[in-house]
Image: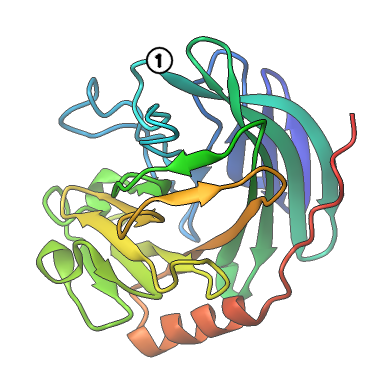
Amino acid sequence: MQAVPQPYDQVSFQRDGVEIARYHFGPTLLRPFVFPVIGPAGRSLTRMGHPHDPVTHNHHNSFWLSHNDVNGISFWDDRGNGRIVHQRLEEFVDDATNAALQTASGWIAKDGRTLLNERRRITVQLLPGDEWLLILDVQLAAATNAVTLGQTPFGLVGVRVAKTIGVKDGGGTIRNSEGGVNEAGVFRKPARWVDYSGPITANASEGLTLLDHPSNPNHPTVFHVRDDGWMGASLTMAGARVIPPGQPLQLRYGLYVHAGIPAPEKIQRQWEAFSRMPLFAFKLKTK
């Protein structure tokens, strides 16, 4: 595995020289994101934007991190009220089965105030059968005064799946850890994981499972999931959360990239393995 820097502020995650994911963090973006997310068949299991509403849903950036209410300011949509601005790459890690990058970013309001200082670590871990796991570790620290993440279903992590995987546009199916199926059984329900799977080629079905880590303060989280092809882990659906100065909030999520449509028992075993992984400890931030 390698995390290979690319032109135009991008990093390519490569398995034996073949890209399976790419991180985008350019200065003109409203938020960093991962696109594509390539499954075992060689196709991206995510897309950019809503297939039928590319204008008002252009903030659906494949696999992304944001929040709709940070001291009343939206970092979720593309109206320009708040931007997550990449500041620096802090570390690259490459070894036989893992590649990782670590970044620092600022959550900056339209008037230029930095509300949150973010540390982010993205780790890609290889699994058998050309499957893989993306681990997202995030630390959010108040820049000066306390920051309130308001009550909303939108944030902190979102996934826009490929069109053919969607329930409405393709032959996809949504399932969660509690036995719910499709939007009617999964929408705004707490769960350990939610899976979105469906056809990706004429001969192959694949999918993505969004995993909530038991160390997260609202675990099992509520998931906001739609039949039209997106799912998100809702950190503050149940109520607002305050980040006091000097007390950063650390969170972990996972994205299991898999072949076929696994039985719930297999997904549960993957979640259990994810839940047992040691949490990442961010070092003190240096100038």
Q: Label 1 is placed on what type of residue?
A: Gly
Compare residues 197 and 192 and report the one nearer the observer.
Answer: 192
Q: Quadrant of residue 225?
A: bottom left
Position of the N terminus, as image quadrant, is bottom right
Q: Quadrant of residue 25?
A: top right
Q: Secondary structure at mark 1?
A: loop
Q: What residue lies at 68% left-to-right and 52% top-to-bottom?
A: 247
Q: Is residue 51 visible?
A: yes
Q: Quadrant of residue 114?
A: top right
Q: Is residue 243 toward the left or the right of residue 12 in the image?
A: left
Q: Please state the horizontal and vertical placement of residue 245, each as a whole percent of the image.
A: 67, 42
**According to the image, what is the colour scheme of the structure?**
rainbow
Residue highlighted by disc 1 = 80
Compare residues 76 and 64 and report the one nearer the observer.
Answer: 76
Q: Is residue 58 toward the left or the right of residue 245 in the image?
A: left
Q: Residue furthest bottom?
A: 265
From what the image shows, is residue 236 above or below residue 263? above
Are there few (<14), some (14-19), or many (20+) residues within 10 Å of tag 1? few
Q: Please state the horizontal and vertical placement of residue 77, each as a whole percent of the image.
A: 34, 27
Q: What residue lies at 58% left-to-right and 78% top-to-bottom?
A: 275
From what the image shows, is residue 119 above or below residue 240? above
Q: Please state the horizontal and vertical placement of residue 279, each as a whole percent of the image.
A: 71, 69
Compare residues 94 and 274 and report the one nearer the observer.
Answer: 274
Q: What residue lies at 43% left-to-right and 46% top-to-bottom?
A: 44
Q: Is residue 8 toward the left or the right of residue 154 in the image?
A: right
Compare residues 227 and 185 and report the one nearer the observer.
Answer: 185
Q: Is residue 204 visible?
A: no
Position of the C terminus, as image quadrant, is top right
Q: Residue furthest top?
A: 111
